[in-house]
Image (cartoon, rainbow, N blue to C red):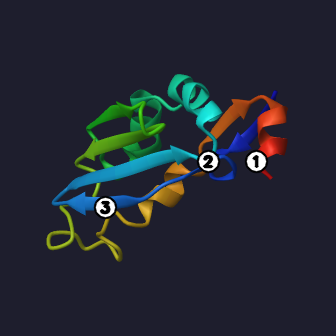
Amino acid sequence: MIEVPLHQVAHSRAGDKGNRLNMSLIPYRPELYPILAEQVTAERVLALFRHRGATACVRHDLPLLHAFNFVVDEVLEGGVNGSLNLDGHGKTNSFRLLELTVTIPEALLERQA
């Protein structure tokens, strides 16, 4: 087993609606889906964004796509039109998600490279 940042084994896209952040998480290999399902929980993602004021996170599992969708509430400091934040959009927040670390079998990492 090896600990790696998510960006080594998955990619993400993000968007925003008002003060709500919407992020996908898609592993590069379908074999990683159950591993990420176990480790990248809604609670863990909420903790990652709590410093930004996040109040809730819901994970939607998309097993036929081997993907996840996370919806994080109250995280964009009011959203694009209401925030004094330099980047009120949710777009860049997927990079923060991809810095989370996960533990995977080393063989899956080698096969991906």
Q: Name the mark on residue 28.
A: 2
Q: Are the two marked residues, 3 and 1, in contact with CB atoms closer than 8 angstroms?
A: no
Q: Secondary structure at mark 3?
A: strand
The numbered mark, 1 or 2, whose residue comes first in the sequence reads 2
Q: Secondary structure at mark 2?
A: loop
Is residue 41 visible in the rendered image? The answer is yes
Task: For label 3, count other residues whose C-alpha is less than 10 Å away and answer few (under 14), some (14-19) or many (20+).
Answer: some
The numbered mark, 3 or 1, whose residue comes first in the sequence reads 3
Q: Please, is residue 16 above or below residue 44 in the view?
A: below
Position of residue 105 measured from the top left corner of the image (x, y, whole percent) = 78, 28
State the image quarter where residue 79 is shown. bottom left
Gap in Å between the C-alphas at discs 3 and 1? 27 Å
Identified at 42% across, 30% down, the residue is 63
Q: State which mark lies toward you, 3 or 2.
A: 2
Position of residue 70 measured from the top left corner of the image (x, y, whole percent) = 35, 41
Residue bearing the label numbered 3: 15
Mark 2 belongs to which amino acid?
Tyr
Gap in Å between the C-alphas at discs 1 and 2? 8 Å
The numbered mark, 3 or 2, whose residue comes first in the sequence reads 3
Identified at 81% across, 43% down, the residue is 111
Mark 1 belongs to which amino acid?
Gln
State the image quarter where residue 58 is shown. top left
Residue bearing the label numbered 1: 112
Identified at 66% across, 35% down, the residue is 102
Position of residue 90 measured from the top left corner of the image (x, y, whole percent) = 33, 62
Mark 3 belongs to which amino acid?
Gly
Q: Are the two marked residues, 1 and 2, in contact with CB atoms closer than 8 angstroms?
A: yes
